[in-house]
Image: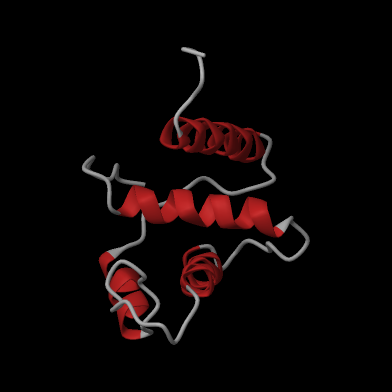
Amino acid sequence: MANELTKEEKAQEVYAKQQEYVETLIADGTLPKIRMITRKQRKALDKANLNYLKLPITDKRNPFAVQEDCYDWILDTVYKEHDFSNLPNNVCLVFARMTFASTYQDELAEKN
C-alpha cells in the first residue's frame, strides 16, 4: 500500500480540486477575479473581531463558525458589487478562503 496518501496529502488534493473548480467559475464569469484584501479592509476585519488568524482560542465559539463569519465578511465587503446569494455555500467558502489566503501570501499584489 505504498500508494496510499497521508491525511495531509488528501487534504491538499481536495484543496487543489476545489481551487481548480473555483478558477473555472472565475474564468466563465460566475465569480469575480480574486482580489487581495486591502490594508483598510484588513483593519476593518480585525476591528470587527472576525480575523480568525488573530482571535484568541476559546471554547465559546465554534472555530468553523468564526471562519465562516470571516468569509461572509470578505464576500460582503471585498466584493460588494457581486451577488453571491444563489451560489452554493461551499463554493462561496472556497472563494473567500482563496481571497483570505492571497492576502497573507508572500507575493506582492499587482496593481489593478
Q: Nearer the viewer, residue 12 or 82?
A: 12
- Quadrant location of residue 18? top right
Decide if residue 98 is on the left or right side of residue 45.
right
Decide if residue 42 is on the left or right side of residue 62.
left
| Residue 24 picture location, percent across and down | 64, 33
The residue depicted at 47 percent of the width and 65 percent of the height is 78
The residue depicted at 36 percent of the width and 47 percent of the height is 112
| Residue 40 picture location, percent across and down | 29, 72
Q: Which of 4 and 15 is in front in this view?
A: 4
Query: 26 above or below 73?
Result: above
Q: Residue furthest right?
A: 86
Query: 45 above or below 15?
Result: below
Decide if residue 7 is on the left or right side of residue 90.
left
Q: Nearer the viewer, residue 97 or 33?
A: 97
Query: 99 above or below 54?
Result: above
| Residue 39 picture location, percent across and down | 26, 66
Task: State how the image is colored.
Answer: secondary structure
The residue depicted at 52 percent of the width and 45 percent of the height is 33
- Quadrant location of residue 37? bottom left
Q: Which residue lies furthest to the top in this view?
A: 2
The residue depicted at 51 percent of the width and 30 percent of the height is 13
